[in-house]
Every structure is written in C-alpha cells, then in structure tokens.
Image (cartoon, rainbow, N blue to C red):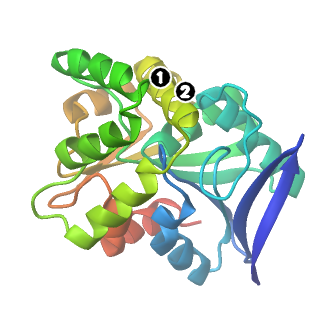
Amino acid sequence: MSSERSWNRGGVVLTGWEHAGPGPTVILLHGWCCDRGFLEPQIEHLASLGHHVVAFDQRGHGGSGWNGESIDIGVFADDVAWLIEELGLGRAMIAGHSMGGLVALELANRRAELVERIALLDSIVAIPPDLTGAVEGLSLLLDSPRCADTIDEFIRKWLVTDQTDRVLVDRVVETMRSAPREVAVDCWRSLVTYDDRGALKACPVPMLFVAAGNSVSRLEELPDMNPGLELACIRGASHFLTLEAPDATNELLERFFRP
C-alpha cells in the first residue's frame, strides 16, 4: 500500500511518501536544494521489490516546512532518526543522493542502532585540495543576491556534462534555484565544512558509494578509508545519476539492499 504522508516534528511538517511493503525498510534522502522527486525511479523500483519504502522532502526543501532556524547535516540526521522511531521502523537501510548521503553517513555514526547499511549516491566527499578556492568562492556568492544564479552556474559547470539531457538539466536547475536562500546557504556551509573523511573512516555499517562519471570526489581514496566501503561507478552518467541512469542505479541498490 502506497500513500502520500506528512509527519509533524515539533511544528515542522515533513511531507513524503510511504510504501508499506512487507520487505526490509529503505529510506531515500535527496540532495542539496532538491526534493524527493530526484529519487522517484528508485522509490518506484524498490517499492516494486516489496521493500517498505519511505521518502520525504527534508526540512526547508520541496513541500516540507522550515521553522527559520539554522539547518545542517546533524539536524537532517536527527529528523531521519526521529522518523525511524516515530514509524517504528527498526533498523533501516538508507540511500542518500549527494547531500543525502552525508545525512545517512552522519546518522550511521550517531545512531548505528537505527541503521543497517547505507548507500551514498555520488555524495560530495574527499574533495581534492585544488578545489578549495572554488568552494570558498561559491560560499560567498551563495550568501549574496546572486544565490539563485550561482546555483544555476554551479550545476551547469560542475554537476552535469555536455551529454546530459537538456530537459533534465532544465528540470534540475528550476528546482534547485528555487530553494530558499537561507536554506541553500546553511546547507552548503554544512556540506563543505563536514568532516566527511572522518565520518567515512568511523562509519560502523556497510557502505556503497556509487560515483557518477563526472564525480568530483577523489575516488582512489575511498576504498582505503573503511573496509566496509564498496565502490561502484556509473560511467557516462552525471551527478544526477538517479534520474539520468536510473536502471544502473536501481540495479546497484537492489543488489546492495538484497536481504
């Protein structure tokens, strides 16, 4: 049984979708300035396999509320922990795209008893040192009247390729540049200051990292960080591989989440 859902956490309403299948629970988390629609092919596929699937717009994103307070990776992780306990889901498997992968990683380190395993779908981790200047410049531009235009430029320069379908690019840009400026800035700052290397090394549950063909991560570093990390790459797909290469993404998740 599938249905649109909403959950009220302390006055912040989180909107989402739940398929109460008989199989293991999978929670799907979208990325920075996105919404759960960016994971629609994975939601549908995992539900068709009988998983209990939960996907929701994280606070400040999509149709979910926001109380004006500062948002960071830890706040998002606490929301997921609350939802797991609120729904009585036990230990869940979690797939997170981009920023959503860092949320899954943080939750696994904070509340390992709630997490079975995690999949990071081209999350921005292990960034090369030579990109530090670009990251700092983006932070300044996002916290300015040029926020929406900066998001647009960032997507087109770093996250998609010349081969990415233009209709998909337009959809991504339209959604991401409409994010509230305060939310975009808070989340970006949390992303770029997050201790991803430390979190990867400490993670106590099995991990799958699915890299896009244009991933900015130093992929060669990842296998040495944690013996429980499995690395896969979808060559030819951009950062938005969940929509651009849904079949390949679904196949990897299906195998990794197989009971």
Where, quadrant-wise, is the C terminus in this rendering?
A: bottom right
**Residue 199 appears in view:** yes
Considering the numbered disc 2 on the image, is that residue within a helix, a strand or a loop? helix
Query: For residue 137, which quarter of the picture?
Result: top left
* Labels 2 & 1 near each other (Cβ < 8 A): yes
Q: CA distance from mark 2 to mark 1?
A: 5 Å
122 up-or-down from 106: above or below: below
Which residue in the structure is indicated by mark 2? 186
Residue 256 falls left or right of residue 76? left
User: Could you say where residue 83 lies in the image, as x and y percent from the top left?
Assistant: 79, 49
* Above/below status of 94 relative to 25: above
Name which residue type carries label 2. Asp
**Residue at screen point 45% across, 29% down:** 188
The residue at 35%/35% (across/down) is 124
Would residue 12 be found to the left or right of residue 149 on screen? right
| Amino acid at dot 1 | Arg
| Residue 6 placement (x, y as % from top left) | 81, 62
